[in-house]
Amino acid sequence: MRALPGRIATLAVALVAGCSGLAAPAQQGERPSAMRLFPAETVLWVRTADAGLLVERLSGTSYGQMLRDPELASLVEGAYETAEAAYSTYARDVVDAELEELLNLPAGEVAFGMVNRHAQNLDPAILLIADFGDHAQVARRVVDRLQQLAEEDRGAQVTIEQLRSDEATVIRRGNDAGGAIAFVQRDATFVASNDPVLLQRTLDRWDGIPVEEIATLEEADAASDSEADNDAGAEPAGPPYLTTLAENPSFSATLREVMPGSEEPPQLLFYVEPITMVEAVGGRGLGTKIAMATFPSLGLDGVKALGGALWLATEKWDSLARGHLLLANPRSGAVKVARLETGETAPPDFVPAAIENFASLRIGPVRLFEDIVGLYDKFQFEGAFRNLIEKRVSAELGFDFEEEFVRNLTGSAFFISGFTEEGVRPAAQPCVAVGVLDQAAAEATLAKLAEEFSGRYEEATFGAATYYRFVPRPFRDVSPDERPFTPVQAVLDGHFLMCQSEGVFKQFVQARDGELPRLNESLQYRLVRSRLGRLTEGEPFSTMLYRDEEPVLRHLHRMATSDEARDRMSEVTEFVPWLGGVRDTLDGAEIPPVEVLLKYASPAGGAVVDTDTGWHFLAFRFQRAVQ
């Protein structure tokens, strides 16, 4: 059996079908954890040790508590009724289960993975392990219905086939063995895969069969396996899946980074090998083969793995996430180019306290530019990149990009997003700021840019600040007050700014001039910064993240109570149908005062630290003492 993209519907049946009762449950020993059942060839892996606990912890977070707040009951019940009506219309008869029953299905360990079969010249295999615990009967009813639909509407065939000590239920379309999905049920747990060898290996590890004994068992199965492979058009290959994911060095190294100390086990784990995954998914295609042949020269083969862990509603945190991008050491090519530097992370004086997100980044602009030059010229000829910049960038912009822009940067970069009081757009408006060494030179460069594109720039002032509105062609005949958005560019307080919103930029000017509270003077920001320092054990940051949920909740409340925002929803319902349901929910609900929402707002922070083994990421959200 081999994976085929067109078999997704059949796979969906098999994933739930483990509790259907079509195969008699086997009474084997205690099941090892998923990381000791999945093979080392796994390139994508997501696992929760206890799905029921994951749902419980989600309910215990501040937002979970918000949804149970009596003062929000009208709004939450309206949203649930809208979702339930949509479910009844589109899915109730398909799965033969109530929405509430499906929401209560998660129980024990659930793990899903994609397994590389490039060595066997096959598409990736899929493996799923799921424990439904006490909700097996609901899953069985759902499966009976999905299986019926698969047989009636998709021509699927369901057969029972003997493995060693287990009976496997196999779902296939017609006589296509290559597109079949098989699963085995053991009590309330099932194992499903589209690769019979992978399925058997997983069961062998569950039963504790040593690796050396598997080879003997393989000889007994060789004839039938060979016949199945021939039917699928595959070439014979050596025995795969003999070692576990826990024995994969990259997995072990990543896990050590994301699960340090004595913290309780995470509610969610994920692991991915990006480069190997590309090989697994498209490695047989000519284009992918050509692309992958360039990876060593680009240094991309140095990207080993990415992993992460998530904790929810713990004694210390509302949420805590750790991640690690595992990189080869020493780094080369693009991975070396993208290395991060450490430096000042404090917000400039122009960043107001009432923003949604603040992120800092420290790079070496000249070093980065020179590294890009070297990497690009390596595949072209000496001087190729600078020729490209001169013809395609400098000539188009009207100034020397390298000399007047790159070499005038300090290396500090900031991303800020915020809201305006009159805004009716659901998302915050972003702004990027980069530090400059010579403000006067930066102002002259911006003036050259505005002159080169005089038809698209409007000079304006606010207070003592001069800035330029960038006016897209459709808005040139529209007054500034009536434009849906007005991007601006300016040099302010030693930084070159590009903002999507003129209103947000004006807030920057007011903060700079002391008319609005500043973020760098905020006690909340300082608390987040201090806690990040503890979590990173004093390691200097390459990137720092800060998020304040209070402005977000205030903005959403303004939108929920704004006739203009609701009218905007009605205008786009034709293109985004679900917004009609949102509008109906808001119209039929009693919107509480914004102070009810603000009880659940708490600050959050994050940081990236560039270490010897790669980029380490962490993020947290403080618990909120809800009154």
Image (spheres, grey):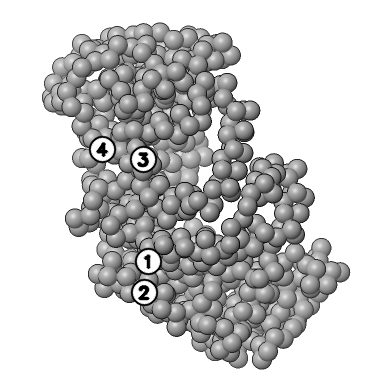
Disc 3 or 2, which lies upstream in sequence? Answer: 3
Gap between marks 3 and 4 measured at Cα:
10 Å
Contact flag, marks 3 and 4 (Cβ < 8 Å)? no
Disc 1 or 3, which lies upstream in sequence? Answer: 3
Which mark's residue is nearer the viewer, 2 or 1? 2
Residue type at mark 3? Val
According to the image, label 4 marks what residue? 35
Which mark's residue is nearer the viewer, 3 or 2? 2
Residue type at mark 1? Ala
Check disc 1 and report its element: helix, strand or loop: strand
Which quarter of the figure has residue 386? bottom right
- Across and down, in percent, residue 325 comes to 35, 55
Check disc 2 and report its element: helix, strand or loop: helix
Indicate the quadrant containing the N terminus: top left, top right, bottom left or bottom right. top left
According to the image, label 1 marks what residue? 607
Which mark's residue is nearer the viewer, 4 or 2? 2
According to the image, label 3 marks what residue? 46
Disc 2 or 1, which lies upstream in sequence? Answer: 2
Return the residue nearer the eye: 152 or 116. Answer: 152
- Across and down, in percent, residue 381 comes to 52, 63
Label 4 Cα neighbours within 10 Å, binned few <14 / some 14-19 / many ≥20: some
Gap between marks 2 and 1 measured at Cα:
14 Å
Check disc 4 and report its element: helix, strand or loop: helix
- Across and down, in percent, residue 286 comes to 50, 36
